Amino acid sequence: MSPLDEQFLIECRELTAQAAEDIVALERDPGDIGRLDRLFRVVHTLKGSAAVMELAPMSRLMHASEDWLGSWRGQERLPAGAIDRVLAILDQTESWLGHFEAEGRLPEDASATADRLLEGTGSHGGASPVGPIPEAPPWAQEMLDDLTDIPAGPIVALDYEPRPGCFFDGDDPLDLVRRLPGLLAVSVVPRDPWPPIEQTDPFTCNLRIRALAAADPGTARDLVRLVADQARIAVVEPAPERATSADVLLNAILAEQGLLLRTPAEPGDLLGRLASAARSAVNALRHAGAGERADRIDAAGAAALAQKDPRPLLAALEEPWSAGPAGSEAPAPTGASPATRVDSARIDRLADLAGEIAVARNGLSHLLGRASGDMAASDLLKQLAERDAELGRLTVVLQRAVADLRLMPVGPVFRRFPRLVRETARSLGKQVLLDMSGEGTEVDRTIVESIHEPLLHLLRNALDHGIEPPEERRAAGKPPEGRITLRAAPDGDRVAIEVGDDGRGIDPAALRRRAVRQGVVTEAAALAMSDEEAVQLVLRSGVSTAARVSDLSGRGVGMDVVRDAVERVGGTLQILNRPGKGTTFRLLLPISMTVTRVMVVRAGTERFGLPMDRALQTVRIPRERIHPIRSGAAFVLRDRTVPLVGLADLLGLTGVTGGDQALVVVLATRSGPVGFEVDGIEDRLDAPMRPPEGLLANMPHLLGTTVRGDGQVLLVLEPEALLP
């Protein structure tokens, strides 16, 4: 698959998710013009992308959907069945994208499928009706007179002045002109005089495009209907013969690059013009499938830059050429990595850091050179310490900058849920509003990819047995429409994602009885639990709050999966319960997965890492304050009994503990704080951690490995998995 195909799939999947969110929101508020406009723009972009990829059925389906959506403007209510039909169109689009990813094309029945989906919409993606079209302006007749080979039949003239901000609307003016059937001639000139190069905004369109095409006037008008305020169509006197059109636009683009290079310029502008001309020509040629010609111009551009002389590039641009049939050249190589969008400011920061590290490294080399001379040992040690501190600072900043590159917003995951909530609520006969916020909150890519399943479980549980049926809500004095909230927000050096509802909440007494009945806890243990502790039983495998088993929940499977998935990425799961008023599940997740704060401890003669984000505190406990409890031990810390275990004992090592006091690291676990006795605490460090691989992957008590400053591998432990 080519990089262009991969980028097409990435963008289209993002757009279909956005469209699904917007159409579900429109169901609740048909008068939301902003949502309708955004949905219209998404469909417009999908149509253009499909056209560029030459996926005609998909482009036609989007084209017709545009027309249909346009007819909704100003209506107080949407057409009957409109929401379901649009969702069906989006489902089909996603299915086609999957087929295109696997096969490189749409299914054979795609055109028939598009027709079926469009039945009853009153739009079929064909040409729009044509009203009176003016006669050709003088420039069109002059352009026609310059042609040597003129086709028979109708000829239209297009005068197109794109808006300066058209790129931000998703428009591609040159692509629109290229899609005019039977293209004969093109003129591209600046709409206004070009400003000095240092004042030029590359994102502002400053073009006026005029073209002649052997095309049906209705087809031409239909092509430009979305930019009707910027384009005018006229009819030119028919001519007897037909000319080729494939070369016209490309030759015009190449000629403009040659004109750019021949225009007098300041010496400092030459390299910029060479790079710009070569890039524009190469992009246009590759877009037309002329890869070999693009490669020649690319090489000529490199030679011109190296020689600081435009002549090699001019010669390549002016070489006689014909495009030939579309797609006749070899396809782009496959196997390229998927495109990833990265904030340019983060890349700039990495470039700055690379420069600072190079400077620090040069300083170290200089110092080594002096050390080989007569430099005093004390001065050498002092300056080595300074260089070490500087490199240490830069390394930490670099690690954080790389971690920032992996950050991405949670919005793409959130946008998958409005439709799920809508359709699940309908199937359950409930009225539910999903309130989302914080979609721009960023976390590590690995975490974004791993939270979909946990959030899916939580939302399904909220829908199935959190939110009550309308009649039950009315009886409880609540509005018939339930509300589910899905929120993300930074929380210190972590990110909190909450799934909450205003439903019936969790009944701790009922949960105790169910846990005892299912053999999860003894009756005595259940009675000894506080309400907060009893609510945590819902996270135990086999325990469910549902009164009945349904297709969605009730089998006691799911909440333990949520907990495990959250803990697998170093997070914690909290439950905030208000019986009769609702429940909120709070996922507290690390922002980054590349750098972990680790406490280095000794167990016997071995060293291990413990995750700092689990550490509550370190204390020394007098041994007379440690009391035996059954087969274990415990101590009292701040009026709370804390279990105590020996880390060396858990790992099967021989400890060297002794003396009057125990050195204890108190760590947070699912069942509360637990004290781990260690033989020493040696260091705290920010460490890039690798997940367990090979034989280590089968050891559940390992979070990962890192390398210490002395080159030794440090095993970072998962304390929860060590507990009996």
Image: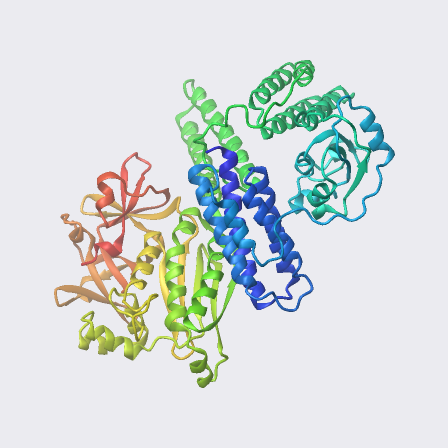
Q: Nearer the viewer, residue 62 or 491?
A: 62
From the viewer's perspective, tell me whether residue 232 is left or right of residue 61: right
Left or right side of 367 for 636: left
Residue drawn at x 45%, y 56% as measured from the top left: 495
Q: Residue at x 30, y 69 (%)?
A: 554
Residue 626 in sight here: no
Give coordinates of residue 21: x percent, y percent.
Answer: 53, 58
Expressed as whole percent of the image width and height from the top left, the position of residue 137 reads: 86, 36
**Residue 60 position (above or below residue 384):** below
Picture residue at 28% right of the left edge, 63% below the top: 557
Quadrant of the rendering where the C terminus is positioned: bottom left
Give coordinates of residue 471: x percent, y percent. Answer: 44, 82
Whether 273 is drawn above or below 3: the answer is: above
Residue 539, above or below 359:
below
- Is 703 or 73 nearer to us in this picture? 73
- Residues 302 and 652: in front is 302
